[in-house]
């Protein structure tokens, strides 16, 4: 599971999910909502374009599997929050 990190700077809450999705807001709830939107945009782009890997880098298959699962949940009309914030 990618790391979920939280920071607060100048009254702005920032959440990051594995370095590929970020959310921010004036409260933790706003930051979480923004993070979920960011993850959904990433997952939908991932599903639409596929996934290719260069020979020099090896993907983290657990993260790729998580992205696939999140895409499946979203495609079925489900809410990814319980999986992201588990």
Image (cartoon, rainbow, N blue to C red):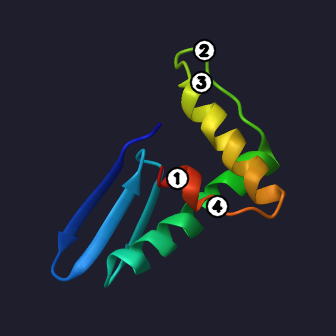
**Which label sits in the foreground, 1 or 4?**
1
CA distance for labels 2 and 3: 15 Å
Residue 6 picture location, percent across and down? 28, 60
Using the image, determine if residue 57 lies above or below residue 63: above
CA distance for labels 1 and 4: 11 Å
N-term mark: 3 or 1? 3
N-term mark: 2 or 4? 4
Residue 86 picture location, percent across and down? 48, 49
Dot 1 crowding, Cα within 10 Å, few <14, some 14–19, many 20+: some
To which residue does mark 3 refer? 61
User: Quick one: SS at disc 3?
Assistant: helix
Residue 40: which numbered mark, if any?
Answer: 4
CA distance for labels 1 and 2: 29 Å
CA distance for labels 2 and 4: 27 Å
To which residue does mark 1 refer? 84
Residue 37 picture location, percent across and down? 58, 69
Dot 4 crowding, Cα within 10 Å, few <14, some 14–19, many 20+: some
Q: Quadrant of residue 45?
A: bottom right
Residue 45 is at least partly visible in this image? no
Decide if residue 17 is on the left or right side of residue 53.
Answer: left
N-term mark: 2 or 3? 2
Assess whether mark 3 and mark 2 are in contact (beta carbons under 8 angstroms).
Answer: no
User: Quick one: SS at disc 1?
Assistant: helix
Residue 13 is at least partly visible in this image? yes
User: Quick one: SS at disc 2?
Assistant: loop
The residue that appears at 15% across and 80% down in the rendered structure is 10
To which residue does mark 2 refer? 55
**Which label sits in the foreground, 3 or 1?**
1
């Amino acid at each position: 599971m990618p790391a979920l990190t939280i920071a607060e700077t100048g009254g702005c809450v920032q959440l990051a999910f594995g370095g590929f999705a970020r959310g921010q807001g004036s409260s933790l709830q706003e930051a979480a909502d923004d993070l979920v939107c960011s993850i959904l945009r990433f997952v939908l782009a991932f599903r639409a374009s596929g996934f290719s890997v260069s020979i020099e880098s090896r993907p983290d298959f657990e993260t790729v599997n998580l992205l696939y699962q999140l895409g499946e949940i979203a495609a079925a009309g489900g809410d990814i929050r319980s999986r992201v914030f588990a």
